[in-house]
Image (cartoon, rainbow, N blue to C red):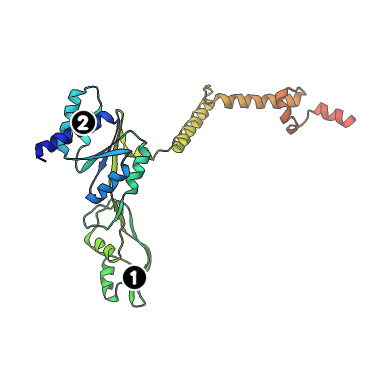
Amino acid sequence: MPTRARKEEYFARMTELLDDYKKVLIVGANNVGSFQMQKIRMALRGNAVVLMGKNTMMRRILSNYMAANPDSAFAALAPLIVGNIGMIFTNGDLPSIRKIIEENRVPAAAKSGAKAECDVIVPPGPTGCDPGQTSWFQALNVPTKIAKGQIEIVSELLLVKAGDKVGSSEAALLQKLNMKPFTYGLTLDYIYDDGALFSAKILDITDDILKAKFTESVRRMAAISLAAGYPTLASLPHSIGKAVKRMIAIASQTGFTFDQMSEWADAFPKPAAEEEAAAEE
């Protein structure tokens, strides 16, 4: 297909996706191979559509779309189209889409110069390396000993910290130990949801976390209101509860009773007059 025809087809496809979908996930696609991308597309089929392409073309299509649809908020996506990125269009549940993306990450060996996405910890145990390579381990400050004719790592070692660059020696050691500490796949960076743009980290906030934070905020509001003597909806139940307790305490000492205190009546000492009368009987 001629280049012009391919561009026109791409323009039409992306424009159609912008019309049909209200949610767009901006994903990083570094170190993602074509076969892995194919598997991701298949896993998302029916729930979302993956669109990859040149950044200049994406920005141009967005610009044309905004010119034709000035009320649309898709312009917020333009500054995010930088580097090796892609778009995932969906109208479905965002956490389930993220779950599919994370399930399609593959183990990967550490490469020299790459930034560590997590702490790389070398566990203790035999390495399979002959004693002649001891000096090489010592250069990396790896605690070792010779056991059964091979080098054995004595204790757990933090080889590379998350965020640091992997050195050539560290990469070679991990390769010798046949360790693949990292994973490659699409990385979810930003989410556009019907006009709102936010970081993908917001998907880590579950309903339980929201409920716990809301409950803690209500408790603090009630405590401040009670201390200040200023009634609010948060403090009102506590104020009423304390008032009822005081009424029950006073009533129990005066011999006055009411229906609401019946279940607590036995918990309070009887007034002195009642005790004397009971003693005379």
Residue appearing at x 31%, y 61% in the figure: 179
Residue appearing at x 70%, y 24% in the figure: 260
The three-letter amino acid code for the residue at tag 1 is Thr
Along the viewing direction, whichever of 175 and 155 lies nearer the viewer = 175
Question: Which of the 4 image quadrants contains residue 171?
Answer: bottom left
* Residue 281 percent across, percent down from the top left: 90, 30
Question: Which of the 4 image quadrants contains residue 124?
Answer: bottom left
Residue appearing at x 78%, y 30% in the figure: 270
- Mark 2 or 1: in front is 2
Along the viewing direction, whichever of 271 and 198 lies nearer the viewer = 198
213 left or right of 244 in image: left
Helix, strand or loop at mark 2: helix
Residue 150 seen from this side: yes
Residue that extends furthest to the front in the rendered view of this protein = 1
* Residue 37 percent across, percent down from the top left: 25, 47
The three-letter amino acid code for the residue at tag 2 is Thr
* Residue 169 percent across, percent down from the top left: 23, 63
Along the viewing direction, whichever of 72 and 114 lies nearer the viewer = 72
Question: Which of the 4 image quadrants contains residue 274?
Answer: top right
Number of marks in picture: 2
Q: Which mark is residue 15?
A: 2
* Residue 80 percent across, percent down from the top left: 22, 36
Residue 78 seen from this side: no
Q: Which residue does the numbered mark 1 point to in the structure image? A: 144
Circle nearer the N terminus (2, 1): 2
Helix, strand or loop at mark 1: strand
Along the viewing direction, whichever of 210 and 240 lies nearer the viewer = 210
Q: Which mark is residue 184?
A: none
